[in-house]
Amino acid sequence: MFDAVKVKDQAVEWIREFFRQNGEGCNAVVGISGGKDSSITAALCVEALGRERVIGVLMPNGQQSDIEFAKLLVNHLKIKNYIVNIKAAVDGLLSALPAEMEISKQTRTNLPARIRMSTLYAISQSNNGRVANTCNLSEDYVGYSTRYGDAAGDFSPLANITVTELRQIGRVLDLPLELVDKVPIDGLSGKTDEDNLGFTYAVLDRYIRTGQIDDQAVKARIDKMHIQNKFKLELMPSFDYKG
């Protein structure tokens, strides 16, 4: 029942309207990982704004084994792009932390995502830009993102579209299939998304859209993750001082 052409066209018009209201003439700045999310986001922005108003930013942390996919995307779309290696920034901050403090695995895993978002905003502010958030509904539903890292941004065209649906949109956009069908890797720990999650996107997407799921243990895991991570999608709580 999913009409990829219709949803693609609606997303393109939504991006145009966002820029009309929040930066007429500004550029879209997109972090390019080489995966489907950043590829589809960049392609939607090109259709909405024109390639001359889209800037791709490749941000390897030292050596990135799949960076050729990111280069394939920016060359395919013919968009202006920068490569910023974040390794020195990540290593510098880690080395600046107190020597007596034990740095957790989670800190080491999530720091690169936050450095990447800082990089995107640095480039955006120097190029009259607005930063694209590339998270999708499937990831957001279970909190598979880094708060103030890849979960940040100025506009989010994929936030209500599942991974399964995005693959259909990627085909409509005529993106190289190796980008659309590329096995998602988190870019942080080196594992695939589905290895980290403990279930497939196909199972998750079916559950999100229909409420149907066969494995009750997986259902319980998804429900728990959704509840635990809902705070990532909410505004920061603020004290309501009445005076």
Image (cartoon, grey):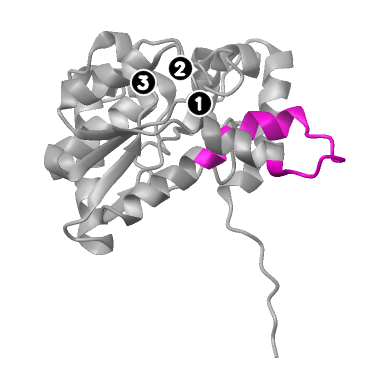
Q: Position of residue 121 (x, y in %)?
A: 41, 50
Residue at left offset 38%, top offset 17%: 67
Give me the residue at 44% from left, 32% from top: 136
Give the SS element for disc 1: loop
Mark 3 and mark 1 lie on one chain; the one further toward the N terminus is: 3
- Which mark's residue is nearer the viewer, 3 or 2? 2
In three-dimensional space, the C-alpha distance between marks 1 and 2, rounded to whole angstroms, equals 7 Å
Q: Amino acid at mark 2?
A: Gln
Q: Which residue is mark 2?
A: 64
Query: Does the magenta-highlighted stretch encompass residue 204?
Result: no
For residue 101, which numbered disc appears in the image? none
Q: Look at mark 3 in the image and give the residue it sits on.
A: 34
Q: Nearer the viewer, residue 23 or 9?
A: 23
Magenta residues span 96-115
Q: Is residue 123 left or right of residue 119?
A: left
Residue 126 % position (x, y): 30, 54
Q: Nearer the viewer, residue 128 or 141?
A: 128
Three-letter code, disc 1: Asn
- The three-letter code of the residue at mark 3 reads Gly
- The residue that label 1 is drawn on is 61
Q: Nearer the viewer, residue 88 or 30?
A: 88
Circles 1 and 2: CB atoms closer than 8 Å = yes
Which residue is at 14% across, 37% downward?
Answer: 51
Instruction: Report, in whole angstroms, how far the alpha carbon at label 3 lies from the one at label 2.
Output: 10 Å
